[in-house]
Image (cartoon, rainbow, N blue to C red):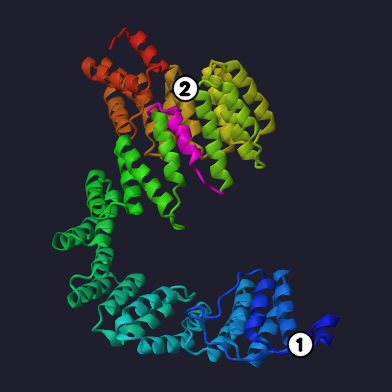
Amino acid sequence: MAPKQQPQDAQTRDHSDQPLAAAEAQRRAAAGEPAQDDATPGDEQAPNVNMTPQMMYQLMNAELAFKKGDWQGPYLTLMSLAQQTKDPRLAKRATEMALAAKQSDDALAAVKLWRQLAPTSDEANQYYLGLVVVSDNLVEAENALKQRLAEAPPGARGLVMFQMQQLVMRAKDKEAAIVMLERLVAPYGNMMEAHVVLAQTALARGAKADAQREARAALQIKPDSEIAILTLAQVTEGEEQSAKVLADYLAAHPDAKDVRVAYARMLVNAKQYEAARQQFLTLDKAQPNNPGTLYALGILSMQMNDNKAAEDYFTRFVDVMDKTPDEERDPTKAVLILSQIAEERGDIPAALGWLDRLDTNDPKIQLGADLRRAQLTAKQGDLAGARKLLGTLKPEDPTEQAQVVLIEAQLLRDAGKSQEAFKLMEQGLKRFPDNMDFLYDYALMAEKLGKTQVMEKSLRKVIAKAPDNQHAYNALGYSLADRNVRLKEAHALIEKAQKMAPNDPFIMDSMGWVQYRLGKLDAAEAQLRKAYQLRNDPEIGIHLGEVLWKKGQHDDARKLWREAQAKDPKNDALKSTLSRLRASL
């Protein structure tokens, strides 16, 4: 492509040849990139060449064209200039352009020139190896990797092997790539890292016995290696056996941090939460401000219904993140959890305070936070302020618009303005007729107002249009059971919901309640106890208490009702239950 005619001043000015470094600075300015020091550590040694005005014009014009969306012309210009000047930075830039345009063949051609101009550049070699592997040019890749491994200093060779493993697994032909990797590390059988890589490749091939043999060979070479024992645990069959491998290692090497983290996570997966928490407490004692440990302890504490401990750990986590921000860790979720915990213990100002500390660029997260702020504002007694806040939210997505309407209706209902809330929902349904979540909530609100026919019609519409919505089946079944009508149908609906979500405690609660209505007290108790164990919710506790009361276990029933009252002193279901059964606390 012929360059455009140069500006007149560039042709006529008395312009001495400029070094390429000056042109590079101007190129960066044209590309909108930050300036770069001439002696940046790790840069290739640039040749001392002069750049003519013609070359400088081509370079700047190429950057401007690339910025406008053209890649091929600028790429060819950079390649030509790199060949003329022998400067590797231009070949590197051509590589970047081709990669940005997703032109792997052109990128490979550019990176080959880059390597030719800067044969000692580690960055150029990394680009080259990545491109030949991804393009499945495994013969060329094997030769380059073999040389790289041979030339690596003995102390760094193990790290090179792990880097090679990650690189090779990006190949399209995984099977051929694995075989190639096994050939590459085979000559280094005296190295622990080689056997770890071989164990991983054997596992990828499905050869578990080979994987275990290689992992044990790695440990024989270096018995205290954390990566070797982690590999052995990974390739060992059975979670209990894998956990034992790590537990035995920790008994001999109590300071092995990575192994302890892996062991703790295994315990979490096995739902051994207290044991897992003890492992993380050990890690916290050894390294008090580790954000990963603090976050894990917060999550585990919540899982164990220890909100006070969870609040302490999440607060420490957020404080650490404030002092030492980490791009890989986002405190947003922890801040939202802390707001929720503060709300649950009745400290609304603290809950709002945590929302004030939220710092996010995600519009969905911000919308969720604003909706919570409105709910908390209403909870403080300022319904007008909450509705005013909701009025300022103008999401473009219809689903999010429906969510704003739904929250406003809930605030009105909670404030005792049920008819106004229902009218708002009716108006919203005209705007969002195909939003099944909105229709579902409209049905529940209708039931609260005694409009059972509207409720049933709406839920059946949800079921017809979203047959995999287990909540609709459950809500309709529970409504029938709670009203003690059409119990056979109620049981069938809840049973269908439970098949879709067998571990949902609220569906278990519905199943227990319909069993109670059918007179099957033992089955009802079993379901409700399981539900209450999974979710310590007042409504579930009230239902379980009624079943126990009917079975004559009055003290146990009162204990559950007192727990429900402590969590929700104004619970209408509890008042209704006590009145209906003529029971007292």
Is 417 colored magenta in this rendering?
no
Give left or right: position of 43 versus 510. right
What crowding class fits label 2: few (fewer than 14 Cα within 10 Å), some (14-19), or many (20 or more)? some
Q: Toward the viewer: 529 or 244?
A: 244
> Which residue was labeled with disc 1?
15
The residue shown at (29%, 27%) is: 523
Note whether 205 is above or below 466 in the view shown.
Answer: below
Q: Toward the viewer: 486 or 585?
A: 585
The region drawn magenta spans 345-361
Give left or right: position of 352 versus 207. right
Return the mark for residue 186: none
Residue 403, image x and y in percent? 59, 34
Q: Is residue 461 visible?
A: no
> Which residue was labeled with disc 2?
479
Q: Amino acid at mark 1?
A: His
Secondary structure beneath label 1: loop
Q: Is residue 512 visible?
A: yes
Question: Residue 261's image quarter?
Answer: bottom left
Note whether 487 is above or below 22 in the view shown.
Answer: above
Q: Toward the viewer: 293 or 12?
A: 12
Q: Toward the viewer: 325 or 176?
A: 325
**The N terminus sits in image quarter:** bottom right
The residue shown at (21%, 16%) is: 555
What crowding class fits label 1: few (fewer than 14 Cα within 10 Å), some (14-19), or many (20 or more)? few
The residue shown at (47%, 22%) is: 479
Secondary structure beneath label 2: helix
Give left or right: position of 516 versus 9. left
Residue 161, image x and y in percent? 35, 79
Note whether 136 is above or below 482 in the view shown.
Answer: below
Is 347 colored magenta in this rendering?
yes
Note whether 428 is above or below 359 in the view shown.
Answer: above
Between marks 1 and 2, how big is the CA–CA gap?
A: 87 Å
